[in-house]
Image (cartoon, grey):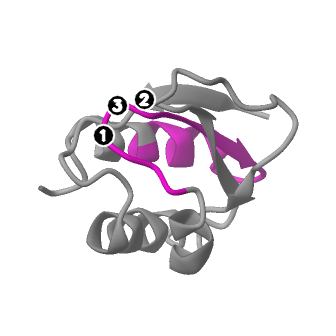
Amino acid sequence: MPSQTVTLENETGLHARPARVFAKKAKEFDCDVKVRKTSDSGSGRSHDQDGDAVNAKSTLSVLTLDCHKGDQIEIITDGDNADDALSTLVELVESGLGE
């Protein structure tokens, strides 16, 4: 199951518009796509490695992660085109989610 951790560099993190952009892109792939916050920029607190993963194809689910600039998220893909989905979503986050 491919996964990669990336840091949110856009000013608003994964708030409404960027979360929608992220979920919309994740829906383009047939594979399962999950995302979870692995560190909190404000507290420096790391999250449980096995918990907190949500469906990345749901804007509301992505919003529940409450991710801000500087937080790290792990994108996890599984199934057909998993590698393509992972690289596309990592590139999207690294490019600032269109902001």
Marks 3/2: CA–CA distance? 5 Å
Q: Residue at x 78, y 52 (%)?
A: 79
Mark drawn on residue 11 = none
For the question of whether residue 29 can be seen, the reply is yes
Return the residue nearer the eye: 67 or 27.
67
- Residue 51 vs residue 69: left or right? right
Which residue extends farthest right? 50
Region of the chain picked out in magenta, as a range: 66-89
Quadrant the C terminus occupies? bottom left
Reading the image, the residue beneath label 1 is: 69
Q: What element carries label 3?
A: loop
Return the residue nearer the eye: 13 or 90.
13
Q: Is mark 1 on a helix, strand or loop?
A: loop
Reading the image, the residue beneath label 2 is: 41
Return the residue nearer the eye: 13 or 87.
13
Marks 1/2: CA–CA distance? 7 Å
> How far across and how far down the image is residue 51, in percent?
84, 43
Check disc 2: other Cα within 10 Å, few if <14, some if 14-19, many if 20+: some
Q: Do the residues labelled 1 and 2 touch (CB within 8 Å)?
A: yes
Q: Are marks 3 and 2 in contact (CB under 8 Å)?
A: yes
Q: Are marks 1 and 3 in contact (CB under 8 Å)?
A: yes
Reading the image, the residue beneath label 3 is: 70
For the question of whether residue 32 can be seen, the reply is no
What type is the residue that disc 1 sits on?
A: Lys
Q: Earlier in the sequence, mark 1 or mark 2?
A: 2
> How far across and how far down the image is residue 45, in percent?
61, 24
| Whether residue 22 is situated above or below residue 1 in the rendered picture | below
Q: Earlier in the sequence, mark 3 or mark 2?
A: 2
> How far across and how far down the image is residue 8, in percent?
34, 37
Marks 1/3: CA–CA distance? 4 Å
Return the residue nearer the eye: 82 or 67.
67
